[in-house]
Image (cartoon, grey):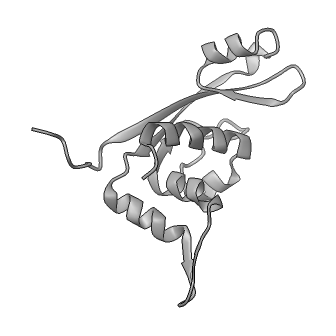
Amino acid sequence: MLDLFITDDQEVIIKIAIAKNKKKETIVDESKEEMLKAYKGEIDEETIEEHEIAFKHPSFGDSVSIGGNITTKDGVNVDFNPFRIRYETMSNLLKSWTFKDSNGDAVPATSDSLKKLSPKIANFIGLLLDEKIGSF
């Protein structure tokens, strides 16, 4: 029997590594190993953090909700906002993450917290999520 329906417990897991290079710039990659290979000698290894972000696997209903959030209608025209696609997808599907603040306290995985995430990190996560779920 084919598995045709998405259940609430199905997740898409994204794993990333974040670090600072010798110039104190933020570097993001898919893993510590990939980062060290790609940026050989440029990474301050003591700054490497590995994180996991869990998203709900999208269903057709999720795609309808997200689609409704990225368009505006004025009664005559329908405008499509491409800048909201990634944000709406991520915020609607976000379940949990391992990010902590500068005091070491867990940061809640909410749309408000997502808005405050560094664009470099958020876009990297979004690209990996796009690869895993495809466009819907």
- Residue at 38% across, 59% down: 62
Nearest the eye: 72 or 10: 72
Nearest the eye: 26 or 136: 136
Measuring from the top left, give residue 12's x and y in whole percent.
41, 38
Q: Residue at the right extreme?
A: 23
**Number of numbered discs overlaid on the protein picture:** 0
- Residue at 65% across, 59% down: 83
- Residue at 46% across, 49% down: 135
Measuring from the top left, give residue 88's x and y in whole percent.
54, 59
Give the left or right position of residue 65, taking residue 19 as reference.
Answer: left
| Occupied quadrant, residue 72 | bottom right
Nearest the eye: 9 or 36: 36
Q: Indicate whether 43 appears above or below 66.
A: above
Q: Residue at the left extreme?
A: 1
Q: Indicate whether 65 appears above or below 96.
A: below
| Occupied quadrant, residue 30 | top right
Q: Is residue 118 visible?
A: no
Give the left or right position of residue 88, taking residue 62 as reference.
Answer: right
- Residue at 29% across, 44% down: 9
Measuring from the top left, give residue 130's x and y in whole percent.
51, 42
Question: Where the N terminus falls, by quadrant?
Answer: top left
| Occupied quadrant, residue 26 | top right
Q: Is residue 63 visible?
A: yes
Measuring from the top left, give residue 14's x and y in whole percent.
50, 34
